[in-house]
Amino acid sequence: MESDANSWMILLRTMGALALVLALIFAVAQIAKKYLKPSNWAPTAGIRVLQSFNLEPKKKLLVVEVENQKLLLGLSESNISCLCTLSAEVKQKTEYQHAVV
């Protein structure tokens, strides 16, 4: 009987230790998520994304502003291409417009 009680005590200690380790991992992840953002590591040098349009799961078009100049960028999984420089003012998207195909 006494060995059964010891077995349960060992199991409860193990489960408690596991719960403590998981809680510690969760706490560290939350702290890292809050304080270790990539934007805190390096300055963005005045780069702002004005609009984004997804073409495919890993391909998109971006309108960005760099030093008061607006650029249309093509972004894929392995490449970023400057498609053109926009001279007209580009407004930030406030509502979705649907095109008839």
Image: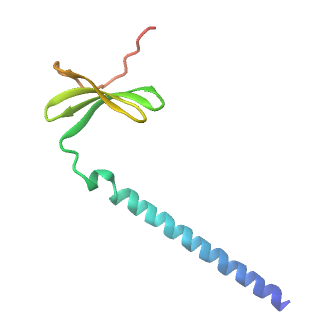
- Expressed as whole percent of the image width and height from the top left, the position of residue 11 reads 72, 78
Q: Quadrant of the N terminus?
A: bottom right
- Expressed as whole percent of the image width and height from the top left, the position of residue 64 reads 25, 31
Q: Residue lying at the far top in this picture: please name it.
A: 101
Q: Is residue 18 left or right of residue 42?
A: right
Q: Is residue 91 left or right of residue 19?
A: left
User: Residue 78 appears in which quarter of the rendering?
Assistant: top left
Q: Vertically, is 101 above or below 58?
A: above
- Expressed as whole percent of the image width and height from the top left, the position of residue 65 reads 20, 32
Q: Is residue 95 left or right of residue 4?
A: left
Q: Residue lying at the far front in this picture: please name it.
A: 78
- Which is nearer the eye, 5 or 25? 25
User: Residue 19 appears in which quarter of the rendering?
Assistant: bottom right
Q: Vertically, is 2 above or below 58?
A: below
Q: Residue at x 27, y 55 (%)?
A: 40
Q: How many marks?
A: 0
| Rendering colour mode | rainbow
Q: Residue lying at the far bottom in this picture: please name it.
A: 2
Q: Residue at x 66, y 74 (%)?
A: 15
User: Residue 88 appears in which quarter of the rendering?
Assistant: top left
- Expressed as whole percent of the image width and height from the top left, the position of residue 54 reads 41, 27
Q: Vertically, is 98 above or below 56?
A: above
Q: Residue at x 23, y 27 (%)?
A: 71
